[in-house]
Image: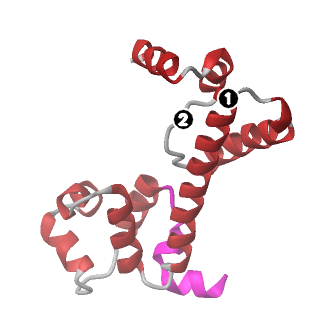
Amino acid sequence: MAGNTKKTAKKLNVGDGYMALIGKFPLVPISDNNQLMQASSVFSTLTLKLDTLDEGENLYREALGQSIAAYEKRQSRATTSASCPVQLIKDLMAVHGLKQVDLVPQFGSRSLVSEFLNGKRELSKEQIIKLCKRFSLKPESLIPELARAS
């Protein structure tokens, strides 16, 4: 796969700076706050050197900025959906391109997923833990009473 990345980079004529940045922080979707902090640090460093970046480094900076923005948008959507765990999970399913069957490991069965998404069942403590782990959420985002208290 690394060979394909270099081949594509040469087609785009992005240079060695771009490849060095890929080695420092790969351009992949950000999945948690630790990755967000790393990405933000790299982005800030590049922004401070904006006048000296070559074309490839600038392309990398723009793509990293888009990745940061996408993660922050997902997190913002999760925060605004906190008062309704059903809507939050539906939003996360849409963002990640998931179907109900993809959540069976977190719920235990298809029928439990369906019942929750249709508002007929609340989440168990075990389901909350598993969903938080899968989507990098804080438990209070799935417990409306805790979200309102904070």
User: Dot 1 surroundings within 10 Å: few (below 14), some, or many (20 or more)?
Assistant: some
| Residue 126 in sight in this render | no
Determine the secondary structure under disc 2: loop
Is 140 inside the magenta-drawn segment?
yes
Q: Quadrant of residue 126?
A: bottom left
- Amino acid residing under circle 1: Glu
Determine the secondary structure under disc 1: helix
Tell me if 87 is positioned left or right of 40 in this view: left
Residue 116 pos. (x, y %): 26, 78
Is 67 inside the magenta-drawn segment?
no
Rendered-image quadrant of the N terminus: top left
- Amino acid residing under circle 2: Leu
Rendered-image quadrant of the C terminus: bottom right
| Residue in front for this viewpoint, 32 or 61 | 61
Disc marking residue 55:
1
Q: Which residues are magenta?
A: 136-150
Give the main secondary structure, helix, strand or loop, of the magenta stretch. helix
